[in-house]
Amino acid sequence: MKHILLIATGGTIASEQTGSGLAPRLHPQDLLRHVPEAADICILDTIQPFHLDSTNISPAHWLTLTGVIEENYEKYDGFVISHGTDTLAYTAAALSYLIQNTKKPIVLTGAQKPIGESSTDAKTNLLDSLRFACSGDCGIVVVFGGQVIAGTRARKTRTKSYNAFTSINFPEIAAIHDQRIVRYIPFREPTEEPVFYHRLNTNVFLLKLIPGIAQEAFTLAGEFCDGLVIESYGVGGIPDVYLDELDDLIKKGKTIIMATQVTQEGSDIKVYEVGERLKTRYRILETYDMTLEATVAKLMWALGQTEDPAEIRRLFCKSVNYDLLF
Ligand code: ASP
């Protein structure tokens, strides 16, 4: 039998009514009492590094999770992280950059309803995650609602339904129905050794464009951080009124990334004049088909490794855990 470490972090799956809203109260052994079938799937150990609604999870917690997995990497065949759904996609993306080339499965899951409620998706999600963690597969994935999604491709697209997550601009890795795993993407074991990273530069800011943002606000957003993601419109472009501000930010050494507010199909800034000039004149990076969650986490990771602009560019453009097809 495979040996799996369940890393419980809180979220709805572990929540109970408190009289002032749901809050994480259940510890990993309480979760497991609701799924006695887990004992037929694997040998489980548990750990609870923190106990939070995922609204409160920050990059420091991503580093804590990385540390827990690194310390226990040799001892276990796989890892399941139970997590709140609200920021689960950010954590899954961040772990994809912080733990690369893993030959063991690292699965993130959660639920839309607490595990103690009579009608809940929590038990299925937890058992499916344990099954995937024991499948001999590898990589960082989200298992939720019968879907297995690459850690860099998940987005929470529904606030209430059980199929809360969508794989953006990339097929699901696999589906899990009636305890059976059907793989859609061929299994690919990394050829390189696992690498754990320990540094992030969290001085990253996301500016979502809306028509008419003041030029000063644009400058303030950029000056506040080392890396600015501009969530623009369509395939990407920047309004004429911010070109001088952009020029200043680039001269100050800020890393600027152009993203799009449109969920599907990604950016392509060379298409229109409002975008093309960014590529030719400013050599701005763009997200192409990456999710916003992956973009933010990848930028924090890249800026955390180096201050050299060429190296930041190289790290950002390198495909990791299926994040970038372009
Ligand atoms: N607010 C909860 C959390 O993210 C929502 C959930 O888990 O579904 O922790």
Image (spheres, rainbow, N blue to C red):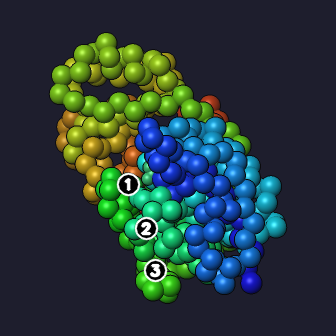
Residue type, mark 2 in image: Ser
Q: Earlier in the sequence, mark 1 or mark 2?
A: 2
Q: Dot 1: what SS?
A: strand
Q: Position of residue 17 (x, y in %)?
A: 47, 48
Considering only order in the chain, which callout, 1 or 3, is on the residue closer to the N terminus? 1
Crowd rating for badge 2 (residues with CA inside 10 Å; few <14, some 14–19, many 20+): few
Q: CA distance from mark 2 to mark 3?
A: 22 Å
Q: Is residue 5 above or below residue 12?
A: below
The span from disc 3 to disc 1 (Cα, nearest Å) is 19 Å
- Against 123, residue 216 (above or below) is above
Q: Nearer the viewer, residue 276 or 164?
A: 164
Amino acid on which disc 3 is placed = Ile
**Residue at the spot 34% in from the left edge and 42% down from the top edge:** 259
Q: Which residue is mark 2?
A: 118
Q: Which residue is mark 1?
A: 156
Question: Which residue is painted at 17% across and 27% down in the image?
Answer: 211
Residue receiving disc 3: 176
- Comparing 35 with 126, the one in front is 35
State which quadrant residue 136 falls in.
Answer: bottom right
Query: Would residue 270 be seen by someone viewing this image from the given angle?
Result: no
Badge 3: residue crowd in 10 Å (few <14, some 14–19, many ≥20): many
